[in-house]
Image: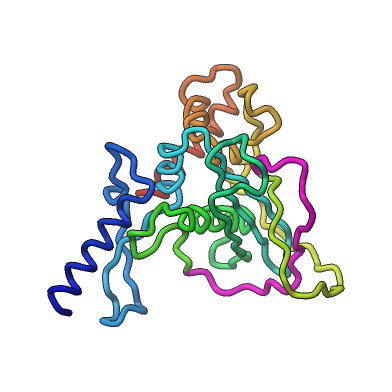
Amino acid sequence: MTMENTQAKQMAMEALQKINAVEGFDPSALAVEYTDLNSPNGGEKRLRLPVMVQIGWFRLKYPEGRIAVSVTAGKDCFVATARIYPHYSAPVEQFLAEATASRGYLLDKPTVSPREWAQTAAVGIALRNAGFGLQFGAAGDSFDAPVVDELGSIMWSGDPADASAGSVPSPVSDAPAVQAAPAAKPREPELTPFEKALKVACPIAKYNGKTLGEVLQIDPKALHWVATKFTGNAEIVAAAKLICDEAVKATA
């Protein structure tokens, strides 16, 4: 590589680092190293930005932003769609980025919920598409899951009345609609303590009707408050603490 090419690459990387820049926050400090087996040199070390860090970065950049996620059952998998909004009041179609991801149940990972995994993967891709992590080798989920069969996926259509977290529609495919036989609903493994914690109702009035898992995606600070300040229900506090602990492990 010539000196001119090297300088051009350096300038390009510096420009990428300015996207969604937040004063005092350096996402590279929270990136994790991974081995890229597909690199030209084979096994080259690169940096990946975890989903939880992407979410935190997004909250710093857009304190009143919104991450809306919806999930449907496909053939032997769950298909999640995530949309990133700069403000919670933004109209349904005025989103910064959108992404879809699918995950299936893995026999060697019985504690991993394919539904939650699909949601996390979709959020990570959507945030990457919105510019949160473009300067890294990868951003979001690890993408090391085996390919799943999405042919039985249920695709959304129409315009919903609301696009709050958990109710955003997936884009409709440009291909002609095909009448398919109903896909068998995947059997989910017994819920782990972490998965049960994610389904616990949030006690904060502002998030009435939402689970702690949903609040984790739309307002992590509120979840931390429940884990450290809320005194109304010991079981809810324990669930919030468990989620916070797992979130910290995920970024370690």
| Residue 227 in the figure: left or right of residue 170 | left
- Residue drawn 59% across the image and 28% down it: 236
Place of residue 80 in the rendered image (x, y in percent of width and height, measured from the top left): 64, 57
Q: Is residue 196 above or below residue 19?
A: above
Q: Is residue 88 visible?
A: yes
Image quadrant occupied by the N terminus:
bottom left
* Color scheme of the displayed model: rainbow
Place of residue 109 in the rendered image (x, y in percent of width and height, measured from the top left): 54, 62
Which residue ends up furthest to the top in the rendered image? 231
- Along the line of sight, which residue is nearer the eye, 108 or 144? 144
| Residue 7 in the figure: left or right of residue 164 | left
- Residue drawn 67% across the image and 45% down it: 92
Q: Is residue 163 above or below residue 73?
A: above
Q: Which stretch did the figure color magenta?
A: 144-165
User: Quick check: is 145 in the magenta stretch?
Assistant: yes
Which residue ends up furthest to the left in the rendered image? 3
Q: Is residue 197 visible?
A: no
Place of residue 91 in the rendered image (x, y in percent of width and height, measured from the top left): 66, 41
Q: Quadrant of residue 163?
A: top right
Q: Quadrant of residue 78?
A: bottom right
Q: Magenta residues: mostly which secondary structure?
A: loop
Place of residue 12 in the rendered image (x, y in percent of width and height, measured from the top left): 27, 63
- Along the line of sight, which residue is nearer the eye, 166 or 86? 86
- Along the line of sight, which residue is nearer the eye, 43 or 14? 14
